[in-house]
Amino acid sequence: MYRDHMDIAYDKDILIKPTSRVPMIGREYGYYTGPGNPLFSLGGGLVRSILYYILTKYHVKRGYYVVETPIIARTTLYELTGHLSFYRENMFLLDIEGDQYALKPMNCPYHVLIFMNLLEKYSHKIKLPFKVFELGKVHRYEISGALKGLMRVRGFTQDDAHLFAREEQIADLFLSVFSDLKDLYEKLFHMSITAESVKLRISLSDKSKIGEEYMGSPEEWSVAEEKLVKMAEEIHRRYGIEYFAAKGEAAFYGPKLDVIALLPDPETGGKKEWQIGTIQFDFNLPRKFKLNKLLEKTHGVSDIYMIHRALLGSIERFLGVYLEAYQGRLPYVLSPVQAVVIGIKSGGDRDAEVVKYAEQVASRLQEMDVRTVASSMDRPHLSGYVRKIRSTLHPPILIYIGERELESGKISAALYDFSRRNYKKITLESMDDLGALIDEAEKDIRELIGNPPRYYVDISYMV
Ligand code: ZN
């Protein structure tokens, strides 16, 4: 049921399915985008824009500078970085006015250029470690047969950052990135990052392929890999999380630590492994750009390293994985429909008043920029209706208004609790308590980034 991630969620509006079938206007829009290029429609566009806001605020609060870099660049940039020799088969190459360009496969080279430019301009005023963040769109070639839903696409957005640091700073920085990752998953996505729910894969080089698939010397790789193992040991000591080594899984510029999450698999009722974040140690690219020489001039030091890290990885893939694991449900702050208010009609004289009261409650929530829809249903059909709303719109808040609520002024609400994977009932004394209910729903995200984004959008067509 959830195998095709394009069709998941509130309705068909989150995504339109890219397909290679013959186009029929009105049904197969995705044909025109080509395979592997999902079109995010109304629900998907909204989820992404809120997620971008949250990720930007989260990174700025943690000392990252936000940048944006172009989708295409001259291939000379990728010659310098080694991408053209080590990563060519994954790149889309273009010819523009006789010059060769490539669609950006990774954001890193641009971030190095930005760092160098700042060093030249502001010299030692640029403090180390220096952290650059981008929600960067990258394109990587995959054969069409390998493309799958949102899991494997040709164009995707990374929550990508590069941290430039001296050798003595690397260990602390690495661990702080891991602790930030834990915070993000737990407070935004309600996914626990513990020994029970994740493990770490130390992705190492294959020593027989150094020079061919991996840049640098065998000695340098050994030193870098040893450092990475130490970090994994420290994470294990602090959080009890296990790690294992995987030979031949490193990036071409350095070894990496991949976080593997065990997520619910609705198909089997068991758990399924997914790679989520990655933290990578790079001793190659800084040297390719002669960053050490530049830093000698500006800071009088030359031991410069880079950490590449993406906490969600690919936003597209992450949303696909999450929607599958949680059966279409998103956290409160990201839900396209955050609250549904249902007026319960009993067939009596006061039905019109009940419906009106439900609409008043909904508009009070809308005034607070909560994405709320008002609806009503006859009592005999109520349970089927609620089931349908829960399984299609997944609203984190459900509010019921009947004659009893009308008389007492109280409000019966249900708030989704991720830890129990179920709704918990809350009775509000009056409409004035709606603010407290929203505060409760926003508690975790507020701890993560301060005031969360609130966008009201009229999504009443969904109900
Ligand atoms: Zn990178």
Image (tube, rainbow, N blue to C red):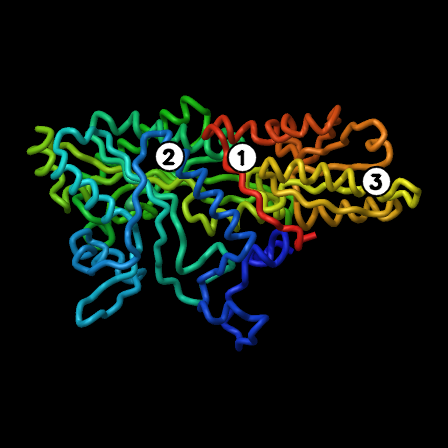
Number of the label disc, if any, that sits on residue 117: none
- SS of the residue under disc 1: loop
Q: Residue at x 40, y 54 (%)?
A: 156
**Of pointers 1 and 2, the one earlier in the residue sequence:** 2
**Of pointers 3 and 1, the one earlier in the residue sequence:** 1
The quarter of the displayed image where residue 27 is located: bottom right
Residue 209 rendering spot, x and y as whole percentages: 24, 51
Q: Residue at x 10, y 38 (%)?
A: 294
**Of pointers 3 and 2, the one earlier in the residue sequence:** 2
Type of residue at label 1? Met
Q: Residue furthest top?
A: 238
- SS of the residue under disc 3: helix
Please say if 40 is above or below 131. Answer: below
Q: Which residue is mark 3?
A: 353
Please say if 424 is above or below 284. Answer: above
The quarter of the displayed image where residue 398 is located: top right
Type of residue at label 2? His
**What is the distance, in whole Å, between disc 3 and disc 1 at their CAs?**
42 Å
* Residue 225 visible to the viewer: no
Q: Which residue is mark 1?
A: 191
The quarter of the displayed image where residue 397 is located: top right
* Residue 444 visible to the viewer: yes
Q: Residue furthest left?
A: 297
Q: Which image quarter is the N terminus in?
A: bottom right
365 vs 265, nearest the viewer? 365
Q: Is residue 275 left or right of residue 94?
A: right
Q: Quadrant of ligand 1?
A: top left
Q: Is residue 135 left or right of residue 426?
A: left
Q: Which residue is mark 2?
A: 59
- SS of the residue under disc 2: helix
Q: Is residue 457 left or right of residue 48?
A: right
